[in-house]
Image: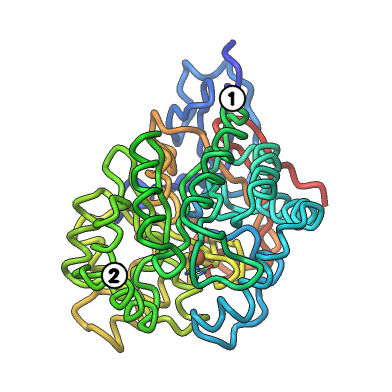
């Protein structure tokens, strides 16, 4: 028999497309060689010989993708939410990230981050490290051990940082990036590098241009922040006066990516028509970070406009501006934010349905990794098994209702097992 081949039985739920969820009570989910063969209400004859694991009444959903999370900021998640972006960076974030120069501190903090990510709903993640090569390599080593599939970036910053958190020049930052790429080359199966200019205010023109060239030369992807906060947007216009909008500044430096090597741009709260067309033209992914956007009073991103324009959208927890790595909670906040956008900003922008938000957390972000994020045939087999039996009810709840209920309140729902490409990477022990 091929390896990583088995059948899971349980309450199966997954997206068919942006608007439809498929759910089976007591359904069968088939994995062959790490690949999904589909979900079925009854087990097909040809799969009857595969080992079957019966999860009874438990829920089985696709693993979720976090398109934007800052590993070094996990240490101060849920605290220091009293400032807006630029002050928040200087007051809390830069001093914390400066500590990762100390490799012992970094290793301990990244142990906490990696272990908690392993126990989460996330099976794929795109992660920021810090400017420090040694610490970022340690982060990659730890993530590789979890079995989660990720992109990880050593951050570039050669201006407007803090005393302890800034590279001395564009040349030094580019050199460090090349050294980091050499140090990790060929070392990891599941953990890939991604170029990570923090955002335009942190990176000189020369550095941005150099990173754009490096991306093309080595076939690397780029992640950054875009149009998150009004003061930030005004600052970018001052820093790159020739740019017609923030995304155009990245474009001028050759750092917007391509369909083959798509960039991830986090936030996009203040992206107007021109910016939307630039994102679309380059096949970029918007990492929608609704929790973070509210915590830092940044605003609400026009997700409905992105979807209508056919832009790739996934969800980012953006810890620590987002307060937790829980993507189910992020689904809920995404829906709530879209309702407030509709009510307070633009009543032609229909709020996101549960189907749409669930899609963004699974298939939407999963697309960045290829065929990932659903149980349709041919997708990679990433699955999370959830026990919600402590959530009492006076009515018969369908699988579809139960998955919605745990997005709105997951306090009594527990992850029992998690699979990535057909390999079990987590089993609950307590
Ligand atoms: N913009 C530049 N750096 C950051 C960061 O660390 N978090 C957030 N939310 N926005 C940023
Ligand atoms: Fe961020």
Instruction: Residue at 31%, 47% (x, y): give it.
Output: 257
Crowding at mark 2 (Cα within 10 Å: few <14, some 14-19, many 20+): some
Q: Secondary structure at mark 1?
A: strand
- Residue 277 visible here: yes
Q: CA distance from mark 2 to mark 1?
A: 55 Å
Q: Is residue 112 left or right of residue 387?
A: right
The location of residue 175, given as percent across then percent down, is 52, 44
Q: Quadrant of the N terminus?
A: top right
Mark 2 or 1: in front is 2
Mark 2 vs 1, N-terminal side: 1
Q: Secondary structure at mark 2?
A: loop
- Residue 11 visible here: no
Name the foreground residue: 226 vs 207.
207
The location of residue 145, given as percent across then percent down, is 70, 37
Crowding at mark 1 (Cα within 10 Å: few <14, some 14-19, many 20+): many
**Pointer 2 residue:** 240
Instruction: Residue at 63%, 47% (x, y): give it.
Output: 133
Applied colour scheme: rainbow
Q: Which label sits on residue 6?
A: 1
């Amino acid at each position: 028999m091929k390896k990583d081949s088995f059948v899971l039985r349980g309450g199966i739920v997954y997206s068919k497309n942006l608007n439809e969820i498929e759910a089976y009570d007591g359904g069968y989910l088939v994995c062959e060689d790490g690949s999904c063969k589909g979900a079925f209400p009854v087990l097909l004859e040809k799969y009857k010989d595969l080992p079957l694991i019966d999860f009874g009444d438990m829920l089985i959903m696709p693993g979720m993708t976090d398109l934007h999370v800052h590993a070094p900021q996990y240490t101060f998640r849920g605290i220091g939410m009293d400032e807006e972006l630029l002050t928040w960076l200087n007051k809390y974030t830069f001093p914390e990230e400066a500590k990762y120069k100390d490799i012992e501190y970094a290793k301990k903090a990244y142990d906490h981050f990696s272990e908690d990510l392993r126990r989460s709903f996330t099976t794929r993640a795109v992660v920021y490290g810090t400017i420090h090569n040694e610490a970022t390599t340690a982060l990659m080593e730890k993530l590789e051990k979890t079995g989660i599939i990720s992109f990880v970036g050593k951050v570039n910053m050669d201006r407007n940082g803090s005393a302890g958190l800034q590279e001395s020049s564009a040349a030094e930052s580019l050199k460090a990036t090349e050294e980091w790429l050499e140090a990790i080359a060929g070392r990891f199966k599941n953990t890939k590098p991604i170029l990570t200019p923090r955002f335009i205010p942190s990176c000189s023109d020369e550095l941005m241009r150099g990173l754009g060239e490096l991306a093309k030369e080595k076939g690397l992807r780029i992640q950054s922040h875009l149009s998150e906060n009004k003061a930030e947007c005004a600052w970018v216009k001052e820093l790159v006066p020739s740019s017609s909008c923030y995304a155009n500044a990245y474009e001028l430096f050759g750092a917007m990516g391509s369909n083959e090597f798509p960039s991830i741009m986090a936030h996009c709260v203040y992206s107007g028509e021109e910016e939307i067309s630039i994102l679309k033209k380059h096949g970029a992914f918007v990492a929608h970070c609704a929790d973070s956007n509210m915590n830092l009073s940044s605003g609400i991103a026009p997700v409905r406009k992105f979807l209508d324009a056919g832009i790739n959208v996934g969800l980012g927890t953006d810890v620590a501006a987002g307060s937790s790595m829980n993507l189910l909670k992020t689904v809920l906040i995404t829906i709530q934010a879209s309702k407030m956008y509709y009510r307070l900003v633009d009543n032609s922008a229909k709020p996101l349905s549960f189907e749409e938000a669930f899609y963004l957390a699974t298939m939407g972000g999963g697309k960045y990794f290829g065929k990932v994020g659903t149980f349709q045939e041919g997708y990679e087999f990433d699955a999370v098994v959830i026990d919600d039996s402590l959530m009492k009810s006076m009515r018969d709840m369908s699988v579809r209702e139960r998955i919605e209920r745990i997005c709105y309140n997951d306090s009594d729902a527990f992850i029992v097992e998690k699979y990535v490409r057909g390999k079990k990477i987590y089993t609950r022990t307590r």
